[in-house]
Image (cartoon, rainbow, N blue to C red):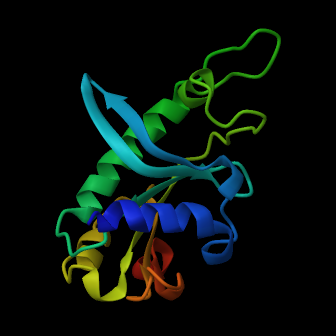
Amino acid sequence: MQPEHWLESRLKSGIAELLPEMRGDLMYTQVPALSSGDRGMLDLLTLDRNGRLAVIELKANEDLHLPLQALDYWIRVRALNDDRQPAAGGRPLTAFERQGYFGGAEVSPAAPKLLLIAPALRIHPANEPLLRYFSPQVEWELIAVSEHWRRELSVVFRKRSSDARA
């Protein structure tokens, strides 16, 4: 009934196999991201193995707005990551860490990665051309999963910002 939530659940439980560079032990779903009084809900937020934040936006169905929605969340997460305040006797903590996220891990000050994930035949044809216009500061990856993701989660193809600029 709710394919996007189903896909989110599948990714959360299978991220280690699908994207081994991501930390599945520190993955959060439906994370509130506030910005100027506006509230958005990130599908998934995690760290890669180097402590760099990763914003994961999912769509189970074709959506023209996927890149712009994901970029909006990326901007919010970058701002919250840049909001570092000194902790008692330790390193400065990000806004996420101050709210209890990523306990025990050190969050890198590097700009977040942006991962857009959807079933291969459900990626809107305009998504990839639009991603090419993103600033080079936004390291993005478009990941197409198998149309049979409900049974078996596997990557069909991956396109990266570095490939688009080459």
Q: From the viewer's perspective, tell me whether residue 112 is left or right of residue 61.
A: right
Residue 120 in the image: state x and y as whole percent: 35, 86
Is residue 57 depicted above or below 53 in this figure?
A: below
Q: What is the residue that sits farthest to the front in this orientation?
A: 1
User: In which image quadrant can residue 137 be found?
Assistant: bottom left
Q: Is residue 82 above or below residue 16?
A: above
Residue 40 x, y percent position in the rendering: 30, 39
Q: Is residue 41 left or right of residue 81?
A: left
Quarter of the rendering containing residue 24: bottom right
Is residue 53 visible to the viewer in this orientation of the structure?
no
The residue at the point 76 percent across, 39 percent down is 105
Q: Residue at x 68, y 69 (%)?
A: 16
- Whether residue 165 sits left or right of residue 28 in the image: it is left
Q: Report the number of discs.
A: 0
Give the answer, above or below, for where 53 lies relative to 98.
below
Image position of 27 with respect to 136: above or below: above
